[in-house]
Image (spheres, rainbow, N blue to C red):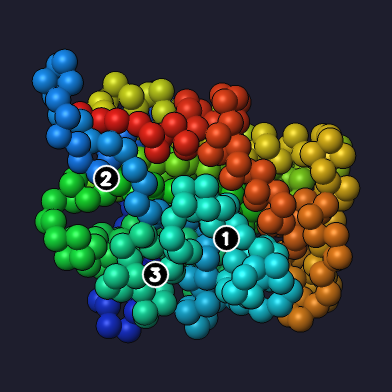
Amino acid sequence: MTILLVQTSNQKQTHKSRPRISTTIMIRKTPLKFIFLCLSVLAYSSTCSTTSTTSHSSGVAKERAGIKGFFIFGSSLVDNGNNNYLQNSVAKADYLPYGIDFPLGPTGRFTNGKNVVDLLGDHLKLPSFIPVFTDPSTKGSKIVHGVNYASAASGILDDTGSLAGQVINLKQQIRNFEKVTLPELEAQVGRRSGGGVLPNYLFIVGTGGNDYSFNYFLSKSNSNVSLQAFTANLTASLSQQLKKLYDLGARKFVLMSVNPIGCSPMAMTMVMTNRPARSNGCVQGLNRAAHLFNTYLKSLIDVSKPLMPGSTFVYVNSYKIIRDIIKNPISKGFKDTSSPCCEVASLSEGGNGVLCKRGGRACAERSSHLFFDGLHPTEAVNIQIASKAYESDLKTEVYPTNIKNLAKSYVSN
């Protein structure tokens, strides 16, 4: 198996007072068997926030689990507005009709209301919305319940998102956490040990779709790279970044699958270099890519367990949740599963087929629409994803358990 070589470049700093942090990824030609071994570095733990002095029969003290906050990494599906502060980024949602149903109005969330991480915060009773890293005011006591590093249009690979101007790729997001937030967090809680601080937090990672939509299927340089080789390289790169978080002290992870991007309104209008065939209203090439990535992503869990003892994690299959809505919309409370709720500027109009027109109209029945713009789901869909992520007992939706059980779990000191 030949793995795609990834050439990366330095990322622009997002805080004027923060030093520029260079990023590089070294991926070599690697057998697929070794890729799965490499992927096994992903881990999750069930450590906790409130210490207990109770001794059990084994004589081992345990901490009671509790989720104090989130650290969020990824792209627009979990971005709370980081790109608002990136001067040269065109991937922004800080204008109406985005946020039309959100308590604070347009904030940079790519939907009409709350996104999945907002809703998970509601389920876990976090006291506030998670602030974005690029906001200069995100410091001090504001970071105690977590920070959002996600950047719309970004991907796992460093060059994904270049068409959108300035974005923050996954490696840079994690570097921002390591170099800026973690020292500040340790100062706030009064402990220097990352292992003693971070197990109280969920590390939510939602990325990968843009690496296909805006990289693999658009770049001529990928024309001779098989989908399997590209996906193996992509998941190996992701594995390295997850291992980095683990080494920094992260123990509880939530991995979001890539959505069925081939069913989005964008996929119907986007001109791609390798245009896949359509079937049942969806671009099957994009969906095959998403499904393959999700298969690799889920496999990380089983392969990782023996190599990462004491770690715990949850894989959320938003792909299936959305596909179920598309297959049986009425039974799920939806009427429109193919068109955007807001006005989207087409390619012929100078748009990109994704973003809502600034100040454009939005549909009245937003709760019955699957898509708010050309790519992103409505709050109604996010509610279903978050609810199932939190408490579904179906392993086809969450694996190996749900976030509610993860939050209740105990771990030995």
Image position, residue 158 (x, y; %): 44, 59
Q: Quadrant of the N terminus?
A: top left
Q: Residue at x 50, y 32 (%)?
A: 402
Q: Residue at x 31, y 34 (%)?
A: 46
Image position, residue 160 (x, y; %): 52, 59
The amino acid type found where label 2 is placed reads Ser
Image position, residue 229 (x, y; %): 51, 36
Q: Nearer the viewer, mark 2 or mark 3?
A: 2
Q: Are marks 2 and 3 in contact (CB under 8 Å)?
A: no
Task: Looking at the image, tell me whether mark 2 or mark 3 is earlier in sequence order.
Answer: 2
Q: Give the spatial CA distance, label 3 vs label 1.
A: 14 Å
The amino acid type found where label 3 is placed reads Phe
Dot label at residue 76:
1
Q: Secondary structure at mark 1?
A: loop
The amino acid type found where label 1 is placed reads Ser
Q: Which residue is mark 3?
A: 133
